[in-house]
């Protein structure tokens, strides 16, 4: 799933700025280094704290990830085939682990069923 990440920086005055966005699975340290080098070449006299540089997932991506979880869960529970159920079961586990890694608590299964679409985006 394509995700949208913001490259941000917090300067010494405590002002947080988004410097760039990147669409990818998950940015690597090399991506962070490249974005930082590019930004520093454009702003050679910038005053910032290196401890406060990084990537964060955009709110749009969080919403999409939760919607994909809901769609996979709804499809898993309502499909007729064993293979389709197994594949959606795996996707539900994958989405839950990605949300846990990002420290995002997903809604309850009851809430996910309300917003889930059978065979929607993110389902097998």
Image (cartoon, helix red, strand yellow):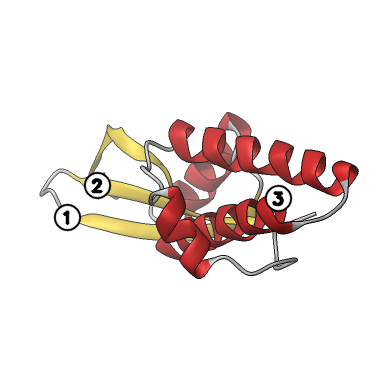
Of the image marks 2 and 1, the number of the one nearer the N terminus: 2
Which is in the foreground here, disc 1 or disc 3?
3
Compute the Cα span from label 2 to label 1: 5 Å
Can I make out residue 57 in this image? no
Q: Position of residue 84 (x, y in %)?
A: 84, 48
Q: Position of residue 8 (x, y in %)?
A: 37, 50
Q: With 109 as the anchor, is 83 left or right in this view?
A: right
Tell me: residue 88, above or below residue 33.
Answer: below
Nearer to us in this view, 19 or 97:
97
Tag of residue 10: 2
Element type at mark 1? loop
The reply to whether the C-beta atoms of the residues labelled 2 and 1 are less than 8 Å apart is yes
Of the image marks 3 and 2, the number of the one nearer the N terminus: 2
Q: Residue furthest left?
A: 13
Q: Position of residue 43 (x, y in %)?
A: 38, 55
Compute the Cα span from label 1 to label 3: 44 Å
Residue at figure coordinates x 51%, y 61% from the top left = 113
Tell me: residue 99, above or below residue 116.
Answer: above
Compute the Cα span from label 3 to label 2: 42 Å
Can I make out residue 18 in this image? yes
């Amino acid at each position: 799933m394509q995700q949208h990440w913001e490259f941000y920086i917090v300067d010494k005055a405590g002002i947080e700025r988004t410097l760039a966005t990147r669409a990818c699975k998950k940015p690597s340290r090399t991506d962070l280094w490249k974005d930082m080098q590019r930004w520093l070449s454009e702003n050679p006299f910038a005053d910032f704290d290196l401890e406060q540089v990084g990537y964060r997932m955009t709110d749009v991506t969080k919403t999409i990830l939760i919607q994909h979880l809901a769609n996979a869960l709804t499809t898993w529970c309502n499909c007729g085939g064993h293979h389709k159920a197994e594949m959606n079961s795996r996707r539900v586990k994958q989405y839950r682990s990605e949300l846990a890694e990002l420290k995002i608590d997903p809604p309850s299964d009851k809430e996910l069923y309300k917003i889930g679409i059978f065979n929607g985006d993110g389902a097998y």
